[in-house]
Image: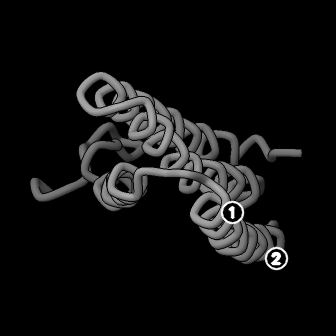
Amino acid sequence: MVDKLAKKSQISGLKLVAFQFLLVLFFALISTVFFSNKAGYSALFGGITFLLPNLIFVLLAFAHAGARQAKKVLRGFYAGEAIKLFLTVLLLVVFLKYGALSLTAYYISFSLLVVSQWLAPFFFYNNDGIKHGWSR
């Protein structure tokens, strides 16, 4: 169960995951239209390899908040990160070993989401409505 205080953080994390999902769908569509069906589903699988573990991390890491919940917060982050790393490796192995993929589209899609994760602080706002980034 998600604490009321943690709900805001979890919603922000889910918004990022939703944005990344739309980004993957757009890239998969572009890959399908301009290249091939194989490139399209490869791009989709590359995105799933990043998105599914990231979604699980968001749900576990932001389930608790506050000073009284410090142990639960820490446990959630550790568990979320461990599951995220394990699931990412598992999906990479499964898709690369058993999928007939276009590796270029797969890796570009995966890399696009990694970069979007790094750039997320520049596009999200803090509690005061001030944009994070270079203009502090």
Q: Mark 2 or mark 1: name the one nearer the start of the chain.
A: 2
Looking at the image, which residue is at 28% across and 55% down? 119
Residue placed under numbered mark 1 in the picture: 94
* Residue 108, image x, y percentages: 32, 54
Residue that sits furthest to the right in the current view: 1
Under mark 2, the amino acid is Lys
Q: Nearer the viewer, residue 13 or 21?
A: 21
* Residue 123, image x, y percentages: 28, 43
Looking at the image, residue 127 lies above or below residue 98: above
* Residue 70, image x, y percentages: 76, 73
Residue placed under numbered mark 2 in the picture: 71
Q: Which picture quadrant has residue 19?
A: top left
Horizontal relation, residue 26 to residue 59: left or right: left
Please say whether residue 67 is visible from this viewpoint: no
Looking at the image, which residue is at 38% across and 46% down? 126
Q: Quadrant of the N terminus?
A: top right
Q: Quadrant of the C terminus?
A: bottom left
Q: How far apart are labels 2 and 1 at the CA level?
A: 34 Å
Q: Nearer the viewer, residue 40 or 69?
A: 40
Under mark 1, the amino acid is Val
Classify mark 1: helix, strand or loop: helix
Q: Residues within 10 Å of mark 2 (few under 14, many from 20)?
A: few
Looking at the image, which residue is at 69% across and 61% down? 61
Looking at the image, which residue is at 58% across and 55% down? 49
Q: Which of the numbered marks, if any, corresponds to residue 6?
A: none
Please say whether residue 72 is visible from this viewpoint: yes
